[in-house]
Amino acid sequence: MKTLLNKHPYLLVATLCGTYGLLYLGRVNVSVVLPILAQDLGVGLAEVGALGTVFFWFYGLFQFVSGEVGSHVSPFRVISAGLLVTALVNLVFAFQTSLLFMLVLWGINGIAQSGGWSPMVRILSERLDSQQIKRASTLMPFGYVIGTALTWTLIGAVTAGGDWRIGFWLPGLLLLALFGFWWRAGIDSPKAKSGGFRPARVLAETRGIVFVLFAAAMSGFVRNGSLIWLPTYILDTNLVAENAVGTVAAFLQVIAIPGLLLAHYRVLSSDQVFMTAVLMLSAAGFAFLLATVTAGILAVLLVAFALMMLNGAFNLVITSITLLLAPPGRASATAGTVNMMATFVGGTAGFIVGLLLEISDWGAVFGMWGVALLLAALVIWWKRAEESG
């Protein structure tokens, strides 16, 4: 299996997409159970929302570490360790009764999950040629979008009776099975000589992608906020039954697939990654702003459209643009730095959105998200000449 996957690009990309998507079983499962968990623990939404903040902060900070490590050691081993720890954390989480211990565990989960994306980007950059990389970089997000939809559907169904614990031990068992498959698959990058960790080089690389870091921060804040709080928004609309919230939220993730396809085909036809990201971020931002002055089904449709555009644009920022700007042999480290910014800032959405909902409403949240995405679009447009440079 190892030889087959390493030698066939399409099987390689499909396996990486599937593995990364299934990692979301042990990551976004918490989003579906936040209201149940708050009630069971006797705490507010802002307090349980801190689970999302802790996860994304640790995930973001360790993206830098995992990205750098993934540039020097076997990506296969980094990804394997992340899969195993995520599975074990979810199993242990299911037996907790203290929010403090839950926060600690979910922080560890963030560290474990940080070992997925950046090492996978290195595998792509070193196993594929330039044309294959361009196609693969616009296909990778299908894994995590489908993984999110699958997770929300599954966890929404199994926790409909009010037992949130099954929403963690079930993903834990499934991820243990995935770890076994990944270990057998043995996908890795070619062994390359490492120049070692040099702070001056890292600092110089970071200065060169400051605008990407800002765009990743703004779009990550919105994307991660939606991952944490979208099921709660669906519940608050009172448009669907409580036991169908997970399914509807999952549908709003699946509907993002046309946005991914739009990004994929426009990049291939126009050869313009930067401007494609600008257009899609702008469309998502204006849709969120319109949602602030609407309600009911129309507001849900606008949110769905915004998420569709956002998913396509977010992938271009953290994958395609990142690969275009990464120095040779530094794809994992550059991807780790960009993803660190997206997830660290995005993690604040767990608490900020929860707090905003306690003092205001979803209109305020959508307004904040719309402005953030328009700022991200403006910065990428300003630096559009970097694509040809």
Image (tube, rainbow, N blue to C red):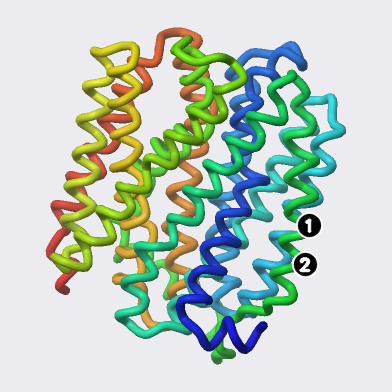
- Nearer-the-camera pick, 149 or 111: 149
Note whether residue 204 is visible: no
The answer to whether residue 67 is left or right of residue 319 is right
Relative image position of residue 142 (x, y in whole percent) = 44, 55
Note whether residue 178 is visible: yes
Quarter location, residue 70: bottom right
Relative image position of residue 336 (x, y in whole percent) = 49, 62
> How would you rate the neighbour count of disc 1 (Cα within 10 Å): few for under 14, some for 14-19, many for 20 or more?
some
Instruction: Tell me the residue at 37%/48% (across/down).
Output: 257
The answer to whether residue 240 is left or right of residue 3 is left
Q: Is residue 133 above or below residue 264?
A: below
- Residue farthest to the right? 95
Name the residue carrying label 2: 180
- Nearer-the-camera pick, 223 or 171: 171
Q: Residue 62 carries which label?
A: none
Instruction: Tell me the residue at 66%/34% (across/down).
Output: 155
Quarter location, residue 268: bottom left
Q: What residue type is labelled 1?
A: Leu
Quarter of the image for the C terminus: give it. bottom left
Relative image position of residue 16 (x, y in whole percent) = 55, 67
- Nearer-the-camera pick, 382 or 6: 6
Instruction: Tell me the residue at 25%/30% (across/down).
Output: 371
- Nearer-the-camera pick, 142 or 126: 142
Q: In this view, does 308 lie above or below 184?
A: above
Name the residue carrying label 1: 176
Quarter location, residue 75: bottom right
Q: Do the residues labelled 1 and 2 touch (CB within 8 Å)?
A: yes
> How would you rate the neighbour count of disc 2 (Cα within 10 Å): few for under 14, some for 14-19, many for 20 or more?
few
Quarter of the image for the N terminus: give it. bottom right
Q: Which amino acid does label 2 sit on?
A: Gly
